[in-house]
Image (tube, helix red, strand yellow):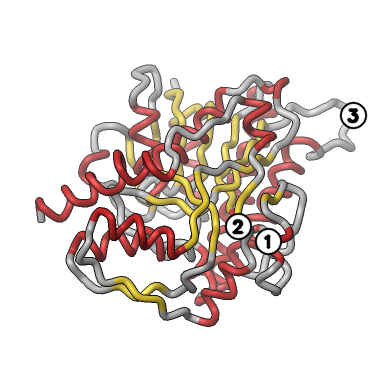
Amino acid sequence: MRKKVILVTGASGEVGHSLIKQLAQDGNNKILSLDLQPLPEELIGLTTHLEGNLLDHILLARIISQYEIDAIYHLAALLSTSSEFTPDTAHQVNVEGTLALLRWAADQSQWRRRPIQFIFPSSIAVYGMPESVHSKDLYQRVREWEWNQPRTMYGCNKLYCEMLGNYYSKHFRQLSAEAPIMLDFRAVRFPGLISAFTLPSGGTSDYAPEMIHAAAKGEAYASFVREDVRIPFMAMPDAARSLTMLAHAPREKLTRTVYNVRGFSLTAGQFKDRVLEAFPEAQISFRPDVKRQAIVDSWPADLDDSAARRDWNWQPEYDAGRAFAEYLIPNIKERYLRS
């Protein structure tokens, strides 16, 4: 008999690290994780882990034969800055991998006669603001359907995958005589994410956590964006919680398939000031990289998350003050005191 599990792809990444810990708090959850990399040591025992490629059809067939999957958290992705260096690989990982999993989940939903839940983390990278820096002043908080004109391969990938999820959850095989059982696709658009427990790994918002890690190690840091640039952020525990909150929301309450979420919005200069409060000797300067600066300039200064607050009672637990005082600074300090 096949085992019932929750599948988490990209489990060894920053979001997967936090999500698996949260899912494991419920003893009824049996977790199957998938990643190209082995799990971090602290996650071993919380999940049954498979190392492999999502594009490996034999591996997917093996999973189907051994497990009955009730929900999928599809976190596997090549992140924004990395995707700009290898756009073809980014498309293969971010789009083809997602499409293969969506097809599989849609088929399984119809075979089982009940929907598999597909939770997808999208990104602020789907937005593309006008090139004038003043556009952020004119459009302070951007809603889900505004400025969907990404300028990066990662943003294009994420926006297309949102559309694919919407198609497979609402329109797939609609020409058949019998109405099919659709999968249950739900997505959140994350702002910049900051973790106290994992190192930055190729995101364009990584200048923020890089400041803290460099300060904690006593190393000088030069930010690759201007001091005045502002985008929204979210502490990693809130990111994991938003995914599970959306997963637990009654389907009839949802008015969208894709929702903005956010924690707090700071300029790079304000981020520096908070780091200096904790590490007064920190050496932080600003040397903007033209290409990465242009990407951040295309992202909104903040996101309108009113739909998530209305439909599934979203509310971040970490504002900027609490994120720094209770989560980021103490845990990152401890990390480097131990090393």
Q: Residue furthest left?
A: 338
Callout 1 amino acid:
Asp
> For the residues marked 2 and 1, what is the alpha-carbon distance in whole angstroms?
8 Å
Q: Residue 165 in the image: x percent, y percent?
A: 69, 44
- Mark 3 and mark 2 lie on one chain; the one further toward the N terminus is 3
Occupied quadrant, residue 132: bottom right
Residue drawn 48% across the image and 80% down it: 289
Q: Are marks 2 and 1 in contact (CB under 8 Å)?
A: yes
Callout 2 amino acid:
Ala
Horizontal side, residue 197 vs residue 78: left or right: left
Q: Residues within 10 Å of mark 1 (few under 14, many from 20)?
A: few
Q: Residue 83 in the image: x percent, y percent?
A: 52, 69
Callout 3 amino acid:
Ala
Occupied quadrant, residue 101: top right
Q: Residues within 10 Å of mark 2 (few under 14, many from 20)?
A: many
Q: Nearer the viewer, mark 2 or mark 1?
A: 1
Does the rendering let one see residue 56? no
Q: Nearer the viewer, residue 260 or 76?
A: 260
Q: Is residue 289 above or below residue 60?
A: below
Q: Nearer the viewer, mark 3 or mark 2?
A: 2
List the residue tagged with mark 3. 177
Q: Secondary structure at mark 3?
A: loop
Q: Residue 75 in the image: x percent, y percent?
A: 49, 47
- Mark 1 and mark 3 lie on one chain; the one further toward the N terminus is 1
List the residue tagged with mark 1. 137
Q: Nearer the viewer, residue 195 or 9?
A: 195
Q: Can you tell which mark lies on residue 301?
A: 2
Residue drawn 25% across the image and 54% down it: 278
Q: Nearer the viewer, residue 301 or 25?
A: 301
